[in-house]
Image (tube, helix red, strand yellow):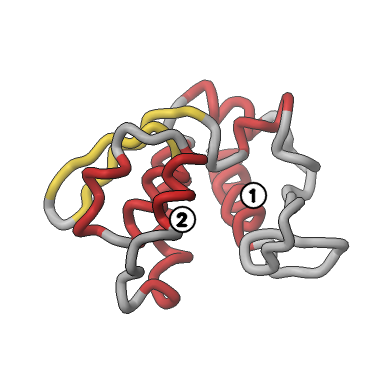
Amino acid sequence: MQFRNEYYFLSNMYPCKITFILNDKSYTFLSAESAYQACKSPVNADMFCNLNGYEAKKLGRKLPLRTDWDIVKLDIMKIILNIKFQNPELLHKLLNIRGEIVEENNWGDYFWGKCNGVGQNNLGKILMSIRDKEKKY
């Protein structure tokens, strides 16, 4: 499954408002990726609010990471994606891919995805967890 065309909504780059509290201040970002990148360097969060996911990812590579990033990044992604799928339209689309294994990776990221069948697929696991939790209600 590629996060393109009908599945683009699964991508963290998909345009959708994400309101997130960071350091006791509320921020609204233009995508899940923008919110995620802001969390890497919370003192610079304001810089990410008006960036699309692609711009945010580019900026995020240039800024210093918070010291506990490797410890908190998975939980932060879970929080952000749970916020994203509070949007009823996006949740409906997610629920409509029931029974499918969600995994995508065209860039060789073995932590968030899979490449040639190898990888942890953490992004897909989070998405399937949200989907499966919501299907029960």
The image quarter in which residue 116 lies: bottom right
Choose the circle earlier in sequence order: 1 or 2. 2
Give the amino acid at mark 2. Answer: Lys
- 88 to the left or right of 41: right
> What residue is at 13 percent from the left and 47 percent from the top?
25
In this picture, is 54 found above or below 116?
A: above
> What residue is at 69 percent from the left and 59 percent from the top?
113
Disc 2 is placed on an element classified as: helix
Q: Position of residue 5 (x, y in %)?
A: 73, 26
Q: Closer to the camera, 91 or 51?
A: 51
Cα distance in 3D space between marks 1 and 2: 11 Å
Residue of label 1 = 128
Q: Say whether residue 136 is visible.
A: no
Which dot marks residue 78?
A: 2
> What residue is at 26 percent from the left and 44 percent from the top?
47
Q: Closer to the camera, 33 or 121?
A: 33
- 40 to the left or right of 70: left
Give the amino acid at mark 1. Answer: Met
Which residue is farthest left? 24
In this picture, is 19 found above or below 65?
A: above
